[in-house]
Image: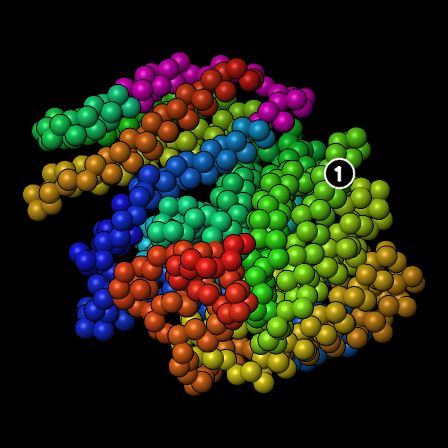
């Protein structure tokens, strides 16, 4: 196989490219949901309500997790594996914290009587925020796999591709959440 | 990063292609045939699953054609076969709707999306761009298994007591959102939605791979404009899928919420069985917007691969370069772009603002321009060609014929004023069956007959193939042409029987004729299925590397390529894929360097 190496000039790793297209695809799904939301808003009986304050804390958590994951990538490139692992663990727990805070936010809404079936404006909140949380959970699972690999003694990792893809995806769900939060706040 | 390195990240089956035969022992039955990561095997998995679905979907149409053609007769054997769904040998009206719905769903999604672009994108993309495999063989395998899971769920829905989904393949709420509305809106509908969600994941994973492979994994010298037109077609198809399927997923998720969690995204002010439902504030039209935002690109997801295959097969068998290569690429792009801007032409009669409607009329009719460019280029490719009427070529020509006939009626239907009369009649049934259904199938057959030698290292039987072609071509016209007349007279689609209408009684004989022909055409497809499976084991063996004398890259691989496709280095490409009849030579393969005294294009 060594003999067969072709000199293909690749600008970007194909897996990374795949991830970017996947991000485009996920964006389309949320574009579909949020445009449906905008159309619905112009109809009568639209209920306005305040988002739970705890969503601000979850926003802080996910932004912090983006920073720690970025640091993890930097330590990985500096081959500082101990710090790299520490940052991965922190990101992992911040991700879990984010999802937990989202769930608490919904429990609070529910207890205020703003339940799923109360009004269409509330109904939209659940699938939109829920689907975002599912994407974050997907990221958390990927983080867990990376984390296990980073602690495995058998495997030595040299390729920066997985960590780079991980951070691309993580920053994406982070930005997606900030977009959704502002969208839900502004357009009511 | 090179192709080889990618393959090595996923070790299973990715052995050294140079020593394929010595290393076969670490490829077990499971990794080779079941959980294969070889794009060629995955393509065959898509193909054979698609064929099984096509038989089921086709059989369903024969069953409901029996009811439409012979509404007075009873068929006692139907009761043995379907039990309670056909008491006394007559189809139950509820089951009739289920059959129509399933026929549409199966053929549109499972056969003409997964079976067509799943098969040929997987098979041809790495072979024609010169890659060892897809960008991510693992995602590719996952894509097939999501399709398989979707198939299992859809198949299971056929066997539940209340029957499969029966609200039409477009599953408009509120009918599909309320279990009380019809027996098919009970558990069958939930299974439909789950199955389609799995199917969407399959389409997305597949599409991601196709796009990345075409853009990133081309061999040296293979610039975008040197690619065969099949590659362009599959590329645009994948882009359409990746952008439009997620929107359908959103729509399906909201529908699942409405069905199971009591939300009112699509429901408002409904009285059912004398009971007033609490749902308020929803809009059924919202679903139609979400559905058709996918639904319209979806018909191009079906037809673009067929266009690509027809272009390639036609050029090879006319021994002429494709006429207007860049115009072909440009028109593919124009069709793909326009397909996102015309979805509301499915909704002209839903109370859409007529002013808005006129924009959609304009954009819809604009699609006629790139379509006409393509037809012109196909005809000029045939013009004065050295045509070899192989079965693949016949189906490619048949495709063009179908595309013209069906495309012309599209101009009628794109007008919002005419649509008031023609919508939901047999006219639209005839239109989309010819231009999308039959044309899509013809593209698929053209590709199958043409690339069968590459897939299985054997030929299919030509005599059976010719019988298959002529019966299918003539039969399709005999089935769908009369439907135009029925539709112009206002005969509505999806109805169980028409004997109650004085005005449609005159079509009794015509309906019988259509049903009779559709049984014959279905039988001819079984002939194809027999030919296909028989030839895998007993067909005439391929003995030469390049049986059709084609210039594209896939014919430079061994007759039965292993995983990795080329035993040595991936060949370098020096020219486009359509150098036929150039400088006195029959054809010049893409791998041959441009000679010094060679004429320029």
Determine the residue positioned at 79% across, 74% down: B512
Determine the residue positioned at 27% across, 66% down: B567
Q: Is residue A129 left or right of residue B435?
A: left
Determine whether the residue tagged by mark 1 lies in a helix, strand or loop.
Answer: helix
Determine the residue positioned at 67% across, 68% down: B384
Q: Where is residue B370 in the image (x, y as percent from the top left)?
A: 67, 48
Q: Position of residue A123 (x, y in %)?
A: 53, 29
Mark 1 — residue? B362
Q: Which residue in the rendered view is the most extreme toward the right?
A: B502
Q: Residues within 10 Å of mark 1 (few under 14, many from 20)?
A: some
* Residue B196 visible in the current orientation: no
Q: Where is residue B316 in the image (x, y as percent from the top left)?
A: 54, 67
**Is residue A45 part of the magenta span, yes or no?**
yes
In magenta, the rendered stretch is: A37-65
Of B24 and B324, which appears nearest the observer?
B324
Of B127 and A91, which appears nearest the observer?
B127
**Is residue A63 part of the magenta span, yes or no?**
yes
User: Residue A54 appears in which quarter of the rendering?
Assistant: top left
Note whether B319 is above or below A180 in the view shown: below
Q: How many marks?
A: 1
User: Residue A35 appears in which quarter of the rendering?
Assistant: top right
Q: In this view, does B543 lie to the left or right of B466?
A: left
* Residue B5 visible in the current orientation: yes
Q: Which residue in the rendered view is the most extreme toward the front?
A: B597
Q: Where is residue B19 in the image (x, y as percent from the top left)?
A: 21, 69
Of A35 and B558, which appears nearest the observer?
B558
Q: Identify the subunit bearing mark 1.
A: B
Note whether B362 is above or below A96 in the view shown: below
Note whether B158 is above or below A44 in the view shown: below
Determine the residue positioned at 52% across, 65% down: B583
């Amino acid at each position: 196989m060594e003999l067969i190496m072709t000199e293909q000039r690749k600008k970007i790793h194909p897996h990374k490219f795949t991830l970017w297209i996947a991000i485009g695809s996920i964006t389309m799904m949320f574009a579909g949901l949020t445009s449906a939301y905008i159309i619905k808003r112009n109809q009568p009986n639209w209920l306005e309500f305040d988002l739970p304050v705890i969503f601000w804390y979850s926003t802080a958590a996910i932004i912090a997790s983006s920073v720690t994951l970025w640091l993890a990538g930097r330590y990985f490139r500096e081959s500082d594996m101990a710090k790299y692992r520490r940052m991965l663990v922190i990101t992992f727990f911040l991700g879990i914290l984010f999802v937990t805070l989202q769930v608490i936010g919904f429990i609070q809404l529910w207890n205020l009587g703003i339940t799923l079936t109360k009004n269409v404006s509330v109904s939209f909140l659940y699938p939109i925020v829920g689907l975002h949380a599912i994407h974050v959970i997907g990221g958390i699972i990927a983080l867990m796999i990376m984390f296990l690999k980073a602690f495995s003694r058998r495997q030595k990792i040299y390729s920066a591709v997985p960590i780079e893809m991980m951070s691309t995806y993580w920053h994406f769900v982070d930005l997606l959440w900030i977009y959704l939060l502002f969208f839900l706040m502004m357009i009511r | 990063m090179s192709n080889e390195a990618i393959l090595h990240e996923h070790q299973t089956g990715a052995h050294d292609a140079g020593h394929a035969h010595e290393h076969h022992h670490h490829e077990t039955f499971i990794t080779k045939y079941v959980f294969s990561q070889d794009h060629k095997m995955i393509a065959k998995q898509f193909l054979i699953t698609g064929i099984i679905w096509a038989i089921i979907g086709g059989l369903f149409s024969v069953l409901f054609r029996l009811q439409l053609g012979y509404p007075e007769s009873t068929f006692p054997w139907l009761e043995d076969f379907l039990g309670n769904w056909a008491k006394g040998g007559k189809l139950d009206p509820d089951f009739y709707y289920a059959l129509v719905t399933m026929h549409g769903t199966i053929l549109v999604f499972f056969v003409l999306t997964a079976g067509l672009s799943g098969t040929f994108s997987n098979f041809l993309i790495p072979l024609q761009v010169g890659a060892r495999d897809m960008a991510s063989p693992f995602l590719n395998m996952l894509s097939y298994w999501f399709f398989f899971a979707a198939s299992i769920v859809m198949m299971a829905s056929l066997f539940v007591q209340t029957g499969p989904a029966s609200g039409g393949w477009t599953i408009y709420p509120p009918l599909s959102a309320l279990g009380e509305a019809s027996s098919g809106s009970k558990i069958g509908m939930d299974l439909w939605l789950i199955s389609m969600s799995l199917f969407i994941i399959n389409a997305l994973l597949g599409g991601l791979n196709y796009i990345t492979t075409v853009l990133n994994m081309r061999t040296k010298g293979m610039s975008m404009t040197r690619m065969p037109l099949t590659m362009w077609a599959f590329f645009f198809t994948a882009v359409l899928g990746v952008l439009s399927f997620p929107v359908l997923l959103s729509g399906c998720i909201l529908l699942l919420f409405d069905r199971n969690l009591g939300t009112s995204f699509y429901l408002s002010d409904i009285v059912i069985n004398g009971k007033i439902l609490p749902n308020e504030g929803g809009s059924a039209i919202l679903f139609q917007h979400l559905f058709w935002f996918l639904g319209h690109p979806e018909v191009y997801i079906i037809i673009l691969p067929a266009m690509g295959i027809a272009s390639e097969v036609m050029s090879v068998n006319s021994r002429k370069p494709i006429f207007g290569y860049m115009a072909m690429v440009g028109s593919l792009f124009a069709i793909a772009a326009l397909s996102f801007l015309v979805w509301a032409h499915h909704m002209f009669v839903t109370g859409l603002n007529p002013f808005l409607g006129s924009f959609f009329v304009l954009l819809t009719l604009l699609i006629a321009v790139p379509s006409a460019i393509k037809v012109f280029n196909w005809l000029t490719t045939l013009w004065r060609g050295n045509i070899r009427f192989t079965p693949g070529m016949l189906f490619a020509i048949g495709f063009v014929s179908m595309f013209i006939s069906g495309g012309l009626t599209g101009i009628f239907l794109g007008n919002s004023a005419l649509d008031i009369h023609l919508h939901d009649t047999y006219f639209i049934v005839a239109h989309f069956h010819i231009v999308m259904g039959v044309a899509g199938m013809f593209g698929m057959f053209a590709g199958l007959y043409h690339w069968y030698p590459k897939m299985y290292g054997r030929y299919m039987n030509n005599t059976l193939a010719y019988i298959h072609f002529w019966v299918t071509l003539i039969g399709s016209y005999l089935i769908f042409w009369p439907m135009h007349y029925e539709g112009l007279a206002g005969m509505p689609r999806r109805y169980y029987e028409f004997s109650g209408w004085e005005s449609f009684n005159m079509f009794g004989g015509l309906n019988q004729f259509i049903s009779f022909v559709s049984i014959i055409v279905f039988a001819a497809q079984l002939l194809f299925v027999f030919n296909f499976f028989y030839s895998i084991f007993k067909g005439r063996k391929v003995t030469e590397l390049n049986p059709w004398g084609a210039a594209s890259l896939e014919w430079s691989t061994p007759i039965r390529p292993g995983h990795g496709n080329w035993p040595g280095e991936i060949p370098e490409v020096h020219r486009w894929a359509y150098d036929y009849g150039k400088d006195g030579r029959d054809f010049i393969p893409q791998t041959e360097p441009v000679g010094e005294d060679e004429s320029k294009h």
